Image (cartoon, rainbow, N blue to C red):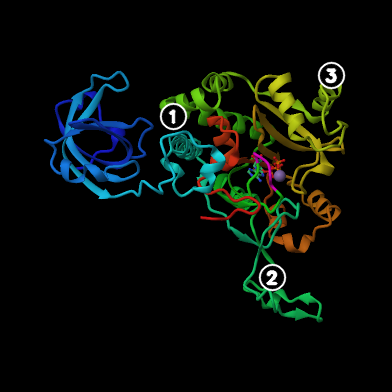
Amino acid sequence: MRIKINQIKESDIGKKITVKGWLKTVRNQKTFSFLDLNDGSTLQDLQIIADESAKNYTKIIEDLTTGCSVSITGEVVKSPGKEQSFEIKATEIELIGKCDAQTYPLQKKRHSFEFLRTIANLRPRTNSLGAVTRVRNALAFATHKFFQEKGFLYINTPIITESDCEGAGEMFKVTTLDLLKPPLKNKKEIDFEKDFFEKPTFLTVSGQLEAECYACAMSDVYTFGPTFRAENSNTARHLAEFWMVEPEMAFADLNDDMDCAEEYLKYCIKYVLENCKEDLTLFDKFISKGLVKKLEHVVNSKFERLSYTKAIEILQNTKKKFEFPVKWGIDLQTEHERYLTEEHFKKPVIILDYPKDIKAFYMRNNDDGKTVAAMDVLVEGVGEIIGGSQREERLEVLEEKIKKMGLDPKTLWWYLDLRKYGTVPHAGFGLGFERLVQFVTGMENIRDVIPFPRYPGHAEF
Ligand code: ATP
Ligand code: MN
């Protein structure tokens, strides 16, 4: 029976096992070979010693090259090398799939992440992308574990929608109309009644509005799904398609929201510190020096909480020069966010009570008439990792806000119903899952923490 490499223990020494995977390196000596095998279960390659006593060895040794797939049976033996405590002495080697050494793009040297993006189909075979994949998986598992332990229900919200949650006009259209000959209304407008959904439809930018419907029945829910933004996202922190974790809590205010966000982040980081030690060592060594210390620091610090107004004061009083000038009412830029968390407070920061004019219609008005109960969590290297708010639960106030922002209350009848029929204070947030993976791995570019990144000009694979 096949065993995964990460399952082999020192206590297996003396046992006969079978492993399957892809060869990372092959070093042929005069009478025997060292093979390094990886199967994705761990960063550590498994060293295999094979010589003529292994069945098939002489027949296939020529074809055993980097990248080929093999099945190897042998005995676990103590390793004399200091890289590993055990290795496999092969008794049988089966070549499953040859690998064309002339064209195989993954050679033993280090490749740039830019180059690896062009071979996203093969890049999970590299140490770094393999490690990212395992950490991403651990963070997804920790996410479900955290919310499930707290009694949140996992719900799935639609991908295709009529509504623009953020009102930012950054949506991808979904249509089955013939773009060369769309049906017209009054000869000039596209007649969407003839389209598949009989209305203009889009890929969702957030599952929040639908999650609110479920929170206002089930109390605590969360979504974890893909979201889409057609913003010109040519930065190291934006993707056109990314995954968002969105909890929504009934009978909760902004403080509860911030508490939940802080606890969730710390939980995920702790989980990875405990369960992905080996992979974190790689990131700490080659990608972001001091990463593990940074993560431990985050777990052990109380996040700084301050109002937007106070944050503006701090930014205005520093000698640091910013590209975007600071004054009350602006939307904070990444440079501002990073200054606050990296240089001023040197720990994660939660900024709350933003000016209402720069925030979405659903955020609850504060009594000052100028701000809303919104909060953003900022972390080192990334800037905004979470955006959340207490939702406006007062029907008249919400209707007023919708109209003021130029939206049509008629299309949001279902959302307004929640405020008509048993309204409750409620709150939630959205965490960009890739930004979390970026933060925890220290990877510089968001395009390298999702298997197949989508960004302007790139939807291959
Ligand atoms: P930013 O100002 O960084 O563009 P945002 O204010 O547009 O973010 P929200 O609409 O509040 O972000 O979305 C919630 C979370 O989703 C953000 O805190 C961030 O972590 C993540 N996020 C937003 N846009 C993107 C994107 N294009 N790619 C990846 N993650 C994103
Ligand atoms: Mn954005």
Q: Residue at x 73, y 46 (%)?
A: 393
Q: In the figure, 2 relative to 163: above or below?
A: above
Quadrant in the picture for residue 33: top left
First of labels 3, 2 by sequence position: 2
Q: Residues within 10 Å of mark 1 (few under 14, many from 20)?
A: many
> Within 8 Å: ligand 1 and the Cβ of disc 3?
no
In the depicted view, which residue is nearer to us: 237 or 397?
237
* Residue 217, position as x, y percentages in the image: 58, 50
Q: At 86% from the left edge and 35% from the top edge, which residue is drawn?
A: 368
Residue where numbered disc 1 is placed: 279
Give left or right: position of 272 versus 202: left
The residues bearing labels 3 and 2 have C-alpha atoms spaced at a distance of 52 Å
Badge 3: residue crowd in 10 Å (few <14, some 14–19, many ≥20) = few
**13, above or below 56, in the image:** above
Secondary element at image label 3? loop
Q: Which residue is mark 2?
A: 199
- Specify the quadrant that holds the N terminus: top left
Q: Secondary structure at mark 1?
A: helix
Callout 3 touching callout 2 (CB < 8 Å): no
Instruction: Work out whether 91 lies above or below 192.
Output: above
Q: Position of residue 432 (x, y in %)?
A: 61, 41
Residue under numbered circle 3: 319
